[in-house]
Image (spheres, rainbow, N blue to C red):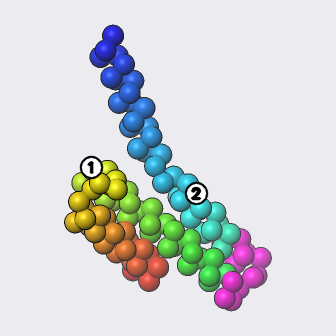
Amino acid sequence: MHETDNEIENETENTRDKLRMIEWLLVAALLLGSAGLMLLLGIRGPYQTLVWKLGLVTLGGFVGYRLDRAAYRDRITLNSPPPIMIRRAIIMAACIGGLALGV
């Protein structure tokens, strides 16, 4: 019985982990879709650029988080060592900068 409970708990944890930060991916999709719609409607200029760049920055944050989680498989909490927190911040900043600059 305990093995079944552990399996269920592990499956629940895996599902929660996969859905972590999914709301930021949805926000990025909404922003990028809005920018595309603005382009189709002929709304160009600073507003369309702003919405597009916000979408890219948001997507970069999501991608950076997922890359760090996939590469190192550790969770960061308030009790995590500072070098681990700095590592994730650097990875996320690199992804955000790369997408925002169009690299």
Q: Position of residue 101 (x, y in %)?
A: 44, 83
Q: Nearer the viewer, residue 48 or 6?
A: 6
The local secondary structure at tag 1 comes to loop
Query: To which residue does mark 1 refer?
Result: 73
Residue 41 is one of the magenta-drawn residues: yes
Residue 26 coordinates in the image, percent (x, y): 58, 57
User: Which labelled disc corresponds to residue 57?
Assistant: none
Q: What is the three-letter code of the residue carrying label 1?
A: Arg
- State the image coordinates of residue 54 (x, y, percent, origin top left): 57, 75
Q: Is residue 47 found left or right of 17 in the rendered image?
A: right
Earlier-in-chain disc, 2 versus 1? 2
Is 3 in the magenta? no
> Image point 29% across, 16% down: which residue?
3
**Residue 83 occupies quadrant:** bottom left
At a point 39% along the width and 36% down the height, the residue shown is: 13
Q: Is residue 100 left or right of residue 4?
A: right
Quadrant of the drawing holding the N terminus: top left
